[in-house]
């Protein structure tokens, strides 16, 4: 059932109000209702990390998050991670280092990496690997993803 | 990274970031599930919960009566069998008469939304008569009570039997100084691509059908849709959006793709069918569960005399690529060493389990592990270094194997030399402390298959079209399917290289069967070699036209003009020239926009015996990997610390992509070796989720040092060979042999879990076989 009051939250910096059933999952809200398809649906079970968004700056699996639970909070998706028509340092590093192959996991990795570098501007390799261990990539073997995040941290892009 | 050949080209041979990278990192790349058609319905399927059952009746009346339901389908409407191989059409879009595994599609609905579709499915009543479950392939080798398919060999569940014998294997074993035998067992593994299977179909009132699908091979999907739905190919349009990984799992035409199209025809509305992750596991088509028995004979000097191989392959419910799989599990043993006598029996057996099919390094992975572990044992028995054993047996360039594979370029010896030095092998082998080890594994793989899976084999394997108008942007069309391996980037780079223009002038168009000329798609590691040659030919045709324009402007014959960066100039006087755009515009005067085409076709090669074409390729890649590992002898946990990967892909055209393929292949190979497994209780899959089916985490991935040593291949585009699948095979035995060096235990039952390591250590202790003093 649609609750009477719309769900209010900040989405990519913009105050947003949308209808949201109590059982509506954030991933569905983003992809199906708001047509923000950059956030990917890989498993619906919290096992792949493709649907990672930032909730108040922290990496969060949108497939395991009820829409109603983001009331009055800040949600950042891949569409809000960089200035319009430009790429962030993390995104530029992913391109330059070949850290994206099929690209389906990439938005999730970019979100996780962005949050990591915000909290730890100079992470060790171990810290990077720990941070991305909830994101599944089947193409790259992770080496180029770790390199890209390291390069972004080093300002080398 | 080591390299011998200096870059001879402006772009090719460098590190070329993927052209679509900026779209992928910003969430703007469009995958099938990101597309939404006006009026789109949701398609859902009902899957069999019985491993094997006769369908007596399916009552769909209540489902049809459900408000919001637009179409309900069962198998009898589209009973035409299909399959990726023309010779084994044994699949149907929905089950007809009986179901053959838990997961077989029994019925389907299209409805306004997901909840309505699920409510309707729940109201479908299926009346069945259970049939015997056949989960063990060994039990299907003989005549059975209720064969899974009528086409099983002599009333058994054998889908395909291959028997080959070259030379005289018994005589070779009789005179051998050394023999080893490896009996190994391999669990089934699956692709685990991140993008689930998904299709959108839109049947329109003009009698056309448009299908968007996550597929590696749009052309085979195009054919299968036409056959099963009875619509001529020219009225079907297949579009491949970005594909989120395939690894072979999106190369068969799959039932849900046809069911989705059929629902759209029934409903008269667009239908999207997105499979959930569990359904992706049931659709499977991953690497076959396999048991092989490999005997190797050698003379006193360690020269290989013979292989004798017997393999039983668990096919699951359908044929899929299985006939190819059955051949490959034998013939892909025939490199990178010279083996003068070879005998093989391979049997692929239907079981009532999810179908297996093609997965990265298809047919070449499991047999490679058994061979390479066998060679490691042989070296130990003879008392020679594993490197020296392999050097002595390497296939030379320009040679022919006993089963008539034509070997052209091989840099296998250079792979061995480079990786031995880089890994510091001679100081480490058998000298690392107990629990630490180093091991060698080698491999080879096909650069595409000489025999296309194609009903009209006289047509080219790949065609590329180019169009350039006055804006100077070059549109490249081809049905080659970029699934993340970087083939769009390679296509653009080859065209830009030949024409001397900047990469951003070349726009690779999406795959659309209405406009893209046929390329057979991404399987058998064929794209770089075949599309690359077609792209080069097309670009050379276009270049000739632009050169003619320049020659006219410069008042010289065409032969006097050469291509430089964004410029055409006189060979004899490089300072005199015209810009690319000036030459283009001159060339366009009589005809308008320029078009050019190029294609590539393999010539038939191999012997004339039955199955001779299996495994023939225009070129082969070669590899030699060294792995260093550490074993926790208390917990049995294995940590692979480093892999040195020497690979011969001819000339690496995009080093960034080649490294990515090698690193990704190692990740996938080590996953199969160390943990991935489709677990069954009887015919029931126990772990159809990414939580229970574990792929390696970032922390489990070793350091990888990529060493590219290939000489130019004489027929590859700019000297290139494949690097997409071959890089997987050597990783598994390199680690397997390193485990032996570490703890003195051989592992021939994959995956090698910590539990198996602890058991092997206990067994070795009981047998009183000390290793490195422990």
Image (spheres, coloured by chain):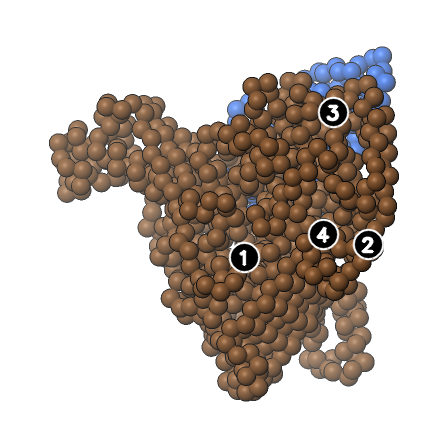
Q: Give the residue at mark 1.
A: B727
Q: Residues within 10 Å of mark 4 (few under 14, many from 20)?
A: some
Of B396 and B256, the residue lying toward us = B256
Q: Residue furthest top?
A: A4
Report the number of numbered marks: 4
The residues tagged by marks 2 and 3 sit, at their Cα atoms, a distance apart of: 32 Å
Does the image show residue B57? yes
Which colour represents chain A?
blue
Q: Residue at x 68, y 72 (%)?
A: B183
Per the model, the C-alpha gap separating discs 4 and 2 is 13 Å
- Seen in the picture, residue B564 relative to A6 is either above or below; the reply is below
First-in-chain label (2 vs 3): 3
Q: Identify the image quadrant of residue B289.
A: bottom right
Question: Between disc 3 and disc 4, whose residue precedes?
Answer: 3
Residue that badge 3 annotates: B71
Circle 1 marks a residue in which chain? Answer: B
Discs 3/4, front: 4
Q: Secondary structure at mark 1?
A: helix
Query: Distance between the Cα atoms at labels 1 and 2?
Result: 37 Å
Establish if B517 lies above or below B648.
above
Which of the numbered marks, if any, corresponds to residue B133? 2
Are there few (<14), some (14-19), or many (20+) residues within 10 Å of tag 2? Answer: some
For chain B, the rendered hue is brown
Instruction: Return the residue nearer the eye: B371 or B450.
Output: B450
Q: For the residue labelled by badge 2, is the local secondary structure a helix, a strand or a loop?
A: loop
Dot label at residue B149: 4
Mark 1 vs mark 3: give the one in front.
3
């Amino acid at each position: 059932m649609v609750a009477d009051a719309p769900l209010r939250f900040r989405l990519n910096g913009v105050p947003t109000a949308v209808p949201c059933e109590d059982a509506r999952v954030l991933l569905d809200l983003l992809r199906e209702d708001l047509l923000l398809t950059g956030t990917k649906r890989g498993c619906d079970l919290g096992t792949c990390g493709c649907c990672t968004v930032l909730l108040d700056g922290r990496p969060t699996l949108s497939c395991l998050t009820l829409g109603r639970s983001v009331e009055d909070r800040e949600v950042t998706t891949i569409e809000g991670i960089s200035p319009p028509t430009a790429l962030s340092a993390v995104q530029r590093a992913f391109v330059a280092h070949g850290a994206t192959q099929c690209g389906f996991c990439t938005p999730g990795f970019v979100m996780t990496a962005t949050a990591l570098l915000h909290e730890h501007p100079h992470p060790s390799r171990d810290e990077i690997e720990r941070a991305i261990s909830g994101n599944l990539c089947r193409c790259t073997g992770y080496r180029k993803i770790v390199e890209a995040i390291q390069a972004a941290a080093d300002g080398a892009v | 990274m080591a390299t011998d050949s200096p870059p001879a080209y402006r772009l090719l041979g460098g590190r070329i970031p993927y052209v679509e990278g900026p779209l992928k990192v910003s969430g703007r790349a469009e995958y099938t599930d990101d597309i939404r058609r006006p009026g789109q319905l949701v398609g859902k399927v009902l899957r069999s919960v019985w491993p094997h059952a006769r369908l007596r009746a399916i009552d769909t009346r209540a489902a049809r009566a459900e408000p919001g339901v637009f179409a309900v389908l069962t198998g009898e409407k589209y009973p035409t069998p299909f399959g990726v191989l023309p010779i084994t059409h044994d699949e149907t879009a929905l089950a007809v008469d009986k179901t053959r595994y838990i997961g077989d599609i029994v019925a389907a609905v299209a409805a306004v939304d997901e909840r309505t579709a699920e409510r309707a499915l729940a109201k479908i009543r299926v009346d069945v008569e259970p049939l015997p479950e056949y989960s063990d392939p060994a039990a299907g080798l003989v005549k059975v009570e209720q064969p899974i398919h009528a086409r099983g060999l002599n009333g058994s569940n054998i889908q395909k039997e291959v028997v080959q014998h070259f030379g005289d294997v018994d005589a070779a074993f009789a005179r051998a100084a050394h023999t080893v035998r490896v009996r190994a067992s391999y669990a089934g593994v699956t692709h685990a691509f991140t993008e689930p299977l998904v299709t959108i179909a839109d049947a329109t009132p003009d009698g056309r059908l448009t299908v968007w699908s996550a597929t590696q091979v749009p052309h085979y999907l195009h054919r299968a849709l036409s056959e099963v739905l009875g619509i001529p190919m020219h009225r079907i349009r297949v579009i491949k959006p970005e594909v989120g990984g395939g690894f072979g799992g999106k190369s068969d035409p799959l039932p849900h793709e046809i069911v989705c199209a059929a629902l759209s025809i029934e409903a008269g509305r667009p239908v999207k069918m997105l499979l959930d992750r569990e359904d992706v596991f049931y659709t499977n088509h991953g690497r076959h569960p396999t048991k092989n028995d490999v005997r190797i004979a050698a003379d006193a000097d360690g020269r290989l005399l013979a292989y004798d191989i017997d393999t039983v392959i668990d096919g699951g419910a359908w044929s899929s690529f299985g006939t190819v799989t059955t051949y490959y599990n034998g013939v892909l043993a025939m490199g990178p060493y010279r083996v003068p006598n070879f005998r093989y029996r391979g049997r692929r057996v239907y079981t009532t389990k999810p179908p297996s099919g093609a997965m990265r390094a298809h047919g070449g992975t499991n047999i490679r592990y058994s061979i390479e572990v066998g060679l490691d044992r042989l070296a130990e028995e003879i008392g020679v270094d594993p490197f020296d054993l392999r050097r002595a047996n390497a296939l030379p360039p320009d040679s022919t194997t006993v089963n008539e594979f034509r070997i052209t370029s091989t840099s296998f010896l250079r792979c061995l030399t480079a990786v031995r030095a880089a890994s510091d092998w001679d100081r480490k082998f058998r000298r690392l402390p107990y629990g630490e080890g180093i091991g060698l594994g080698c491999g080879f793989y096909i650069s595409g298959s000489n025999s296309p899976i194609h009903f009209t084999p006289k047509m080219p394997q790949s065609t590329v079209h180019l169009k350039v108008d006055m804006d100077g942007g070059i549109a490249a069309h081809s049905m080659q399917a970029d699934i993340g391996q970087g083939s769009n980037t390679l296509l653009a780079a080859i065209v830009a290289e030949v024409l001397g223009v900047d990469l951003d002038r070349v726009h690779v168009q999406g795959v659309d069967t209405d406009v893209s000329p046929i390329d057979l798609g991404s399987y058998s590691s064929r794209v770089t070699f075949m599309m690359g040659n077609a792209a080069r030919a097309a670009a050379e045709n276009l270049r000739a036209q632009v050169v003619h324009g320049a020659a006219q402007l410069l008042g010289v014959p065409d032969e006097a003009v050469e291509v430089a960066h964004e410029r055409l100039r006189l060979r004899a006087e490089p300072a005199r020239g015209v810009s690319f755009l000036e030459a283009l515009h001159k060339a366009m005067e009589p005809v308008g926009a320029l078009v050019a085409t190029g294609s590539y076709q393999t010539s038939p090669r191999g012997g004339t015996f039955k199955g001779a074409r299996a495994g023939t390729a225009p070129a082969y890649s070669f590899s030699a990997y060294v792995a260093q590992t550490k074993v926790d002898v208390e917990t049995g946990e294995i940590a692979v610390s480093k892999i040195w990967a020497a690979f011969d892909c001819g000339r690496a055209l995009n080093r960034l992509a080649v490294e990515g393929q090698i690193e990704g292949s190692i990740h996938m190979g080590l996953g199969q070796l160390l943990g991935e497994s489709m677990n069954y209780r009887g015919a029931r899959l126990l772990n159809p989720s990414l939580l229970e089916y574990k792929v390696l985490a970032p922390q489990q991935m070793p350091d990888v040092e990529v060493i590219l040593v290939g000489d130019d291949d004489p027929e590859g585009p700019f000297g290139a060979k494949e690097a997409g699948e071959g890089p997987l095979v050597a990783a598994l035995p390199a680690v397997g042999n390193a485990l032996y060096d570490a703890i003195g235990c051989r592992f021939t039952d994959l995956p090698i879990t910590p539990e198996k390591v602890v058991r092997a250590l206990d067994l070795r202790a009981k047998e009183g076989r000390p290793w490195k003093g422990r």
